[in-house]
Amino acid sequence: MSEITTTADALETIRKVRQVRQYVPGEVSDDQLHQLLEIARWTGSSRNMQPWRFVVVRDKAVLQQLAALRENITWVADAALVIALVSPGHNLQHEAYDEGRVTERLMIAASMLDLGAGTAWFGEPEREAKAKALLHVPEGSTLRSVVAIGPFVTSKDPRPAGPRPGRLPLDELVRWETYE
Ligand SMILES: Cc1cc2nc3c(=O)[nH]c(=O)nc-3n(C[C@H](O)[C@H](O)[C@H](O)COP(=O)(O)O)c2cc1C
């Protein structure tokens, strides 16, 4: 694990978390997986409903089938595992927000364990339905995304037409006291 001995190290580790799409063969150990799931478990959620259920998928054949559901997520096939985020579909807005929170925590924790992680969305309802069928998720529940995790080479986006890299500068993002 990368040495994190100071607050500055910890903040820098979090700042550097990126979407990983280039994985290499290798494992997430049971101990690492347990740590990741504990971090996920303790994520805060709307009214502490903890709407998520985490489906851990390590079966390569299933990873390949999930990856094939959408062109933008083919890299999922190369991850060591995915954690599929299933919600009950009772409050779509709250559950989507909660899903974002748990995703980011998983990505940060993976990075601290020297693993890569990336969110993969299925996109359209038909693709989501196929993903649900693959993982035997009940009809009314939501499965919008999975978090892929595993040993990786780089967090560079290999796609020629991916989103623009980097981030907007703070002076473009931050307003003081009022918006305008
Ligand atoms: C809601 C959401 C959906 C995303 N879906 C995908 C996806 O399906 N495939 C993919 O490769 N990246 C996906 N991403 C990752 C974004 O492209 C990524 O966070 C952004 O480009 C910044 O990348 P960076 O952290 O590597 O700089 C998604 C991110 C979010 C927040």
Image (spheres, rainbow, N blue to C red):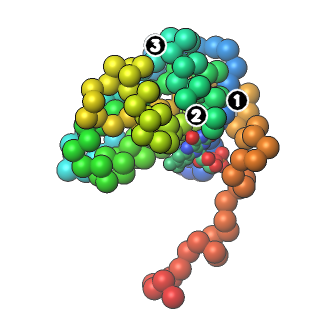
Residue found at the very far bottom of the displayed protein? 180
> Of the residues shown, which amino acid type is indicated by label 1?
Gln
Q: In the image, which disc is placed on residue 70? A: 2
In this rendering, would 53 be left or right of 22? left
Spatial separation of the CA atoms under disc 3 and disc 2: 29 Å
Three-letter amino acid code at the position of disc 2: Arg
**Cβ–Cβ under 8 Å for marks 3 and 2:** no
Percent coordinates x, y for residue 45 in the rendering: 28, 47
Q: Which residue bears the numbered disc 3?
A: 30
Disc with the residue nearer the chain's start (3 vs 2): 3
Residue 51, position as x, y percentages in the image: 26, 39
Marks 2 and 1, the one that precedes in the sequence: 1
Which residue, given by chain and number where applicable, does mark 1 sit on? 22
| Front in this rendered view, residue 10 or 30 | 30
Of circles 2 and 1, the one toward us is 2
What crowding class fits label 3: few (fewer than 14 Cα within 10 Å), some (14-19), or many (20 or more)?
Answer: few
Ligand 1, by image quadrant, is top right
- Is residue 173 depicted above or below 99 in this figure? below
Residue type at numbered disc 3: Asp
- Residue 140 rendering spot, x and y as whole percentages: 25, 35
Query: Is residue 169 visible to the viewer in this orientation of the structure?
Result: yes
Q: CA distance from mark 2 to mark 1?
A: 16 Å
Report whether residue 112 is seen. Answer: no
Image quadrant for the N terminus? top right
Which residue is most to the front? 126
**Disc 2 element:** loop
Residue at 27% across, 30% down:
139
- Residue 43 is tagged as none
In this rendering, the answer to whether 151 lies above or below 15 is above
